[in-house]
Image: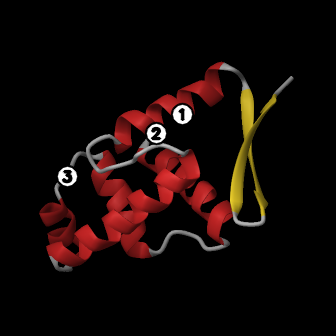
């Protein structure tokens, strides 16, 4: 997956769950984490404090954990996203996210 594909995939999941797109700092955390950068490196690149970037990252991992029903952390973000994305692609299925009340449901629809 490319960085752009990852950002779009995460943004789609977050939007379906919250009705909001990733903001600039969340996008920076996704991009930087995908490129194996530390929070310090991401913070320097965007002229932010490392603690603020870490806080945003922590909130994002918690949200993605709820969406994917897995414990997502900075350390397993890449492998988890690759696995989920691979499952979707190899089964030629299109991810459809449906919100029912406060529950996000992921449905994989076979593409013909």
1 vs 50, left or right, is right
Q: Position of residue 62 (x, y in %)?
A: 42, 60
Q: Which mark is residue 84?
A: 1
Q: Residue at x 62, y 56 (%)?
A: 12
Q: Position of residue 74 (x, y in %)?
A: 29, 50
Compared to residue 22, the image places residue 13 above or below, namely above
Q: Earlier in the sequence, mark 3 or mark 2?
A: 3
Crowding at mark 3 (Cα within 10 Å: few <14, some 14-19, many 20+): some
Q: Which mark is residue 81?
A: 2
In the rendered image, which residue does mark 3 sit on? 37
3 vs 58, left or right, is right
Q: Which mark is residue 103?
A: none
Compared to residue 107, the image places residue 103 above or below, namely below
Q: Earlier in the sequence, mark 1 or mark 3?
A: 3
Compared to residue 1, the image places residue 8 above or below, namely below
Disc 1 vs disc 3: Cβ atoms closer than 8 Å?
no
Which residue in the rendered view is the most extreme toward the top? 90
Q: Residue at x 61, y 74 (%)?
A: 20
Which picture quadrant has residue 60? bottom left
Q: CA distance from mark 3 to mark 2?
A: 16 Å
Describe the element under mark 1 as helix, strand or loop.
Answer: helix
Which residue in the rendered view is the most extreme toward the right? 112
Q: CA distance from mark 2 to mark 1?
A: 5 Å
Q: Residue at x 16, y 56 (%)?
A: 38
Q: Position of residue 89 (x, y in %)?
A: 63, 26
Disc 2 vs disc 1: Cβ atoms closer than 8 Å?
yes
Q: From the image, which quarter does the C terminus lie in?
A: top right
């Amino acid at each position: 997956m490319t960085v752009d594909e990852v950002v779009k995939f995460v943004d789609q999941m977050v939007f379906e769950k919250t009705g909001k797109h990733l903001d600039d700092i969340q996008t920076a955390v996704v991009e930087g984490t995908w490129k194996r950068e530390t929070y310090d490196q991401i913070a320097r690149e965007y002229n932010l404090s490392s603690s603020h970037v870490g806080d945003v990252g922590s909130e994002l991992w918690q949200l993605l954990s709820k969406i994917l029903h897995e414990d997502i952390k900075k350390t397993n973000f890449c492998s988890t996203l690759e696995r989920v994305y691979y499952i979707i692609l190899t089964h030629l299925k299109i991810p459809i996210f449906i919100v029912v009340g406060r529950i996000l449901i992921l449905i994989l629809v076979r593409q013909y």
